[in-house]
Image (cartoon, helix red, strand yellow):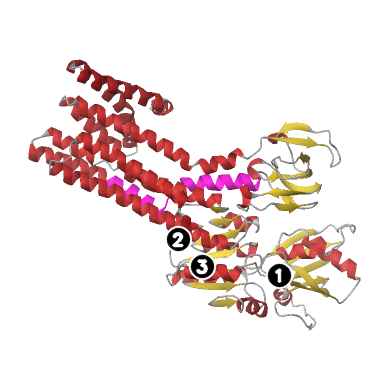
Amino acid sequence: MYAIQNLFKKFQKENLIGMTLLLILAFGFKFGNLINLSQIMMLLTALIGVLPILIRAFSALKYKSIAIELLISIAVIGALLIHEYDEAGIVVWLFAIGDWLQMIMMNKTRQSIRELMDTFPTTALKISTPDDRQYQEVDIDELVVDQYVLVKSGSTIPVDGVVVQGSSYVNEASITGESKPAHKKVLSKVFAGTIVNDGTIVVQVIKIGDETVFGKLIELIEDAQDSQTKEQRFVDKFARYYTPVILVLGIIVALWTKNMETAITVLVLGCPGALVIGVPVSTVMGIGMAAKNGIITKGAANFNILSRKNYFIFDKTGTLTVGEPTVVNIKNLLGDREHNIKLLASVENESNHPLARAILNIHNDDNALYLAQDVKSIAGQGMRAQINHKSILVGNQKMMKTENISIPSLVMNKSDSQVILVVDRQVHMVLMINDQLRPQIKENLDQIKQQGAKKLMLLSGDNQAAVDVVANKLPFDTAIGNLLPADKLAIVKKLQVQGESVVFVGDGINDGPALSQADLGIAMGGGTDIAIDVSDLVLVNSDPVQISLAIKIAHATMRNMKQNIFIALATVLILFVGLFTNYVDMSIGMLVHELSVLLVVINALSLNYLKSLF
């Protein structure tokens, strides 16, 4: 049965053209007073059109589901039995038109995804060394990690990697939504699907194909489009009960009026075609619009949550700050200064935390790193490792307290973060690191409050003094420091027990439990893979202004879904009123039905043109 169903789907357009030609002939014969030939054409139209509908109805019945196709099938077969060939032919033709329009519109709503996929290159210019210019054009699948690829001006970067030669301005709009080109030089990370505006660069391969940031974005978007909102689940549940009710109503009308034509018309007009398509088309439009602006939602249900009055909880480092901290003070307490920095860099080289990058930036690249062994990351505290048979700890005050290691008293700015190097349980060095707040962060938080956030909270693993310095500049209702990942998780759970809806915004490994527990986890795109994996929504260019935009898109999408549900149900109600007052017959009813399908699709497409969103 699936093979026949797929065959009809494959030739859907040709089937519709054939039915349309038969319908034109039927009306032509009727105009020429050749009634018998006209009825034969209508009968053929009905038989060709009802077959795929019948197959879909039986397929649904196999799973104990009474689909609207069953209503159409019974209505058409009934019309044929009472020799109403005109109605039967027009009903199936209009249904086929509706199916075709649905396919066209759904394809259009997925256009933004296809546009993204079209930018992904299928080949790369492979070279042997960074200086080699004798390239070989190969399929992407033939590349392996650590190979080199040449990317010329105007070309699309085929892999995720790091620039090892050359510099260029790169258009990263396909990844971040940011139209301003980013400057890339040696050691800069670059991403597949982005475009080199000028110059030629050599990229060392890190990730290929589906493993790239671009590949994962496409996967997330496609998964999200298959997910369901609360409204979609309502529609599915509603349809399960609605169809049997209409069937029973048709039987009652048949018994009451003794008029089979009226009973069959009840079945046809009761088909909620606009209700079936209304919610999915709004969902797909909302997700596509968010994706075009660098906001990747892993499920359509996230729109439900974002449109509530939520507690918004923010991590500090890498979320409210730019995530590019710099070392502002170094206190070398024991041993050689350069050797200590090399030890620090050797351990932090194993991490992708923002503080690690700050430490690597003060290390002399000509001084090769040590081999760090048995490296272990301790969430919310730091890292431990073995280097040259020495025990190395790199972490904050909380780690030192846990390890019972005394820290000498030092004068420091309250907003600075401390990173302490301990070798064989002796403190060798203390670094003071500062991170700048993101531009416009206060205005972004003010806007989130104006959009209906119930409370804004700041939870950080940093010391309370540093948290207070940040919180005093921003409109937070609560700011708590010195928190371990388990503490953040406990706060989220406590709010949920109190009946609150919680949105958590973070970027690091230590945010993973809270991101996962929250009703909605939002990860910064530049954050750790774990944070991105467990979150529900990703801000690709790590800009908090996207949170406000995501809320606007969520509200607009939810409003659009509810409008479509109203249009669909109102159409059915009006048609029944018209039928029982003798103003509507079967043909007019089907025409109104298909117009209502077109109306909900156009309404969903209007989301693209809402100026209030931007």
Say which quadrant the N terminus sits in: top left
Residue placed most toward the observer, 114 or 81: 114
Q: CA distance from mark 2 to mark 3?
A: 14 Å
Q: CA distance from mark 2 to mark 1?
A: 31 Å
Q: CA distance from mark 1 to mark 3?
A: 23 Å
Q: Main secondary structure of the magenta part?
A: helix
Asked if residue 534 lies in the magenta stretch, the reply is no
Does residue 584 appear in the picture of this structure?
A: yes
The residue positioned 26% from the left and 49% from the top of the image is: 570
Q: Left or right: where does residue 599 sit relative to residue 139?
A: left
Q: Quadrant of residue 330?
A: bottom right
Residue placed most toward the observer, 612 or 280: 612
Which of the numbered marks, if any, corresponds to residue 476? none
Q: Position of residue 348 (x, y in %)?
A: 77, 62
Asked if residue 218 lies in the magenta stretch, the reply is yes
Residue placed most toward the observer, 187 or 587: 587
Does residue 516 appear in the picture of this structure?
A: no
Q: Which of disc 3 and disc 1 is earlier in sequence?
A: 1
Judged from the image, the secondary structure of the residue bearing numbered disc 2 is helix
Q: Quadrant of residue 42?
A: top left
* Nearer mark to the viewer, of 2 and 3: 3
Which of the numbered marks, if any, corresponds to residue 305? 2
Report the number of numbered marks.
Answer: 3
Judged from the image, the secondary structure of the residue bearing numbered disc 3 is helix
Q: Which of disc 1 and disc 2 is earlier in sequence?
A: 2
Magenta span of residues: 212-241
Q: Which residue is mark 1?
A: 435
The residue positioned 24% from the left and 45% from the top of the image is: 572
Furthest-right residue in this view = 336
Residue placed most toward the observer, 462 or 174: 174
Q: Amino acid at mark 2?
A: Ile
Contact? badges 1 and 3 (CB < 8 Å): no
